[in-house]
Amino acid sequence: AKRAGRGRYRVFEAGMDDLLHKRREMEIDLRRALALKQFELHYQPILDLSNDTVIGFEALLRWKHPVRGNVPPLDFIALAEENGLIVKIGEWVLRTACLEAASWSDGMIVAVNVSPLQFKADTLLETVASALEKSSLSAERLEIEITEGALLDDTDNVLQTLKALRELGVKISMDDFGTGYSSLSYLQKFPFSKIKIDRTFVASANADSEAILRAVAGLGTSLGMAITAEGVETAEQLARIRGERCTHVQGYLTGRPMAPEMISSFLARPKPH
Ligand code: C2E
Ligand code: CA
Ligand code: CA
Ligand code: CA
């Protein structure tokens, strides 16, 4: 038993070493990624369900690593949050998204994900104002997406920043609603103009997730907010959310994230029937 135990321990140790090593390597690479221009934004269309037209796009960060290939955001954003790099990366995202969106047809909005850490850094308002100014994008065309994590602590500070952003004309969306620490009181306390319902509630067709979807859409609607259903992949799911009070849809069915150079042809494509 002892030997088996030691053996297991060694395997575990080697695994940990390997993991720590990979992490350190990734961190070194991440520190250089901005300077080496390895980041790109891809854009996923958001559709208005009342007329099935594209109203804009969500910017999604892509890291093109020379050796690892495309590293998905879920594999590096947590690390960038732990070491604080997310602040610089987030500034790049805001600047780039505003610049790229400024070239889209009139009125198209761009939605940008902002990490809770960017609120803590206290530079968010300045960064947004400067990104808008340098791109000449009008504030009404920018949506900031935040997750519940941003609302948990330092609530007063976050609330002040969100109010100031709203005063600039920027809209705020509550992202991934229904996951994490969702509290219904957030919807009243913070100045959201949109709720994005997480795709877990859209994907599963069971009675519970349908009830949650219906309740959130109903509550959001009565509070005067737009409701986006995220992660719609099938025609059945689309039909289901059309029956609910969702105002917008975003998912692989209506458009995958695409490189910026694909946007104009995507917008010019004939409407599918
Ligand atoms: P999110 O903000 O909830 O973004 C939606 C994610 O769902 C994206 O993954 C998108 O590609 C994916 N998605 C969209 N439609 C579908 C669908 O129909 N089915 C499925 N299975 N997935 C769908 P992605 O691009 O891998 O991003 C993952 C997360 O990384 C984002 O989740 C967001 O939390 C974070 N993220 C992405 N870009 C940024 C950024 O610039 N800054 C920050 N702070 N976070 C970002
Ligand atoms: Ca988002
Ligand atoms: Ca989301
Ligand atoms: Ca998510």
Image: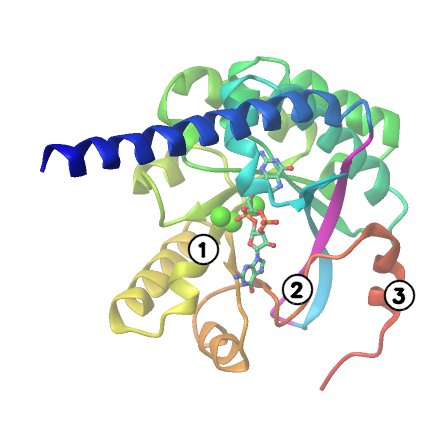
CA distance for labels 1 and 2: 14 Å
Q: Residue at x 89, y 60 (%)?
A: 264
Residue shown at 74% from the left, 35% from the top: 139
* Circle 3 crowding by C-alpha within 10 Å: few under 14, some 14–19, many from 20: few
- x then y, percent, for residue 234: 53, 77
In magenta segment, residue 197 = no
Mark earlier in primary sequence (1, 2): 2
Mark 2 or mark 3, which has the lower sequence index?
2
Q: Is residue 177 left or right of residue 267?
A: left
- Label disc, if present, on residue 257 of the rendered structure: none
- Closer-to-camera residue (76/129): 76
Q: Which residue is mark 1?
A: 197
Q: Quadrant of residue 22?
A: top right
- What residue range appears in magenta? 37-50
Q: Which numbered tag is attached to residue 265?
A: 3
In this rendering, the answer to whether 214 lies above or below 177 is below
Few, some or many residues within 10 Å of mark 1 (<14, 14–19, 20+): many
Q: As shown in the figure, which amino acid type bears the numbered disc 3?
A: Ser
Disc 2/disc 3 C-alpha distance (Å): 16 Å
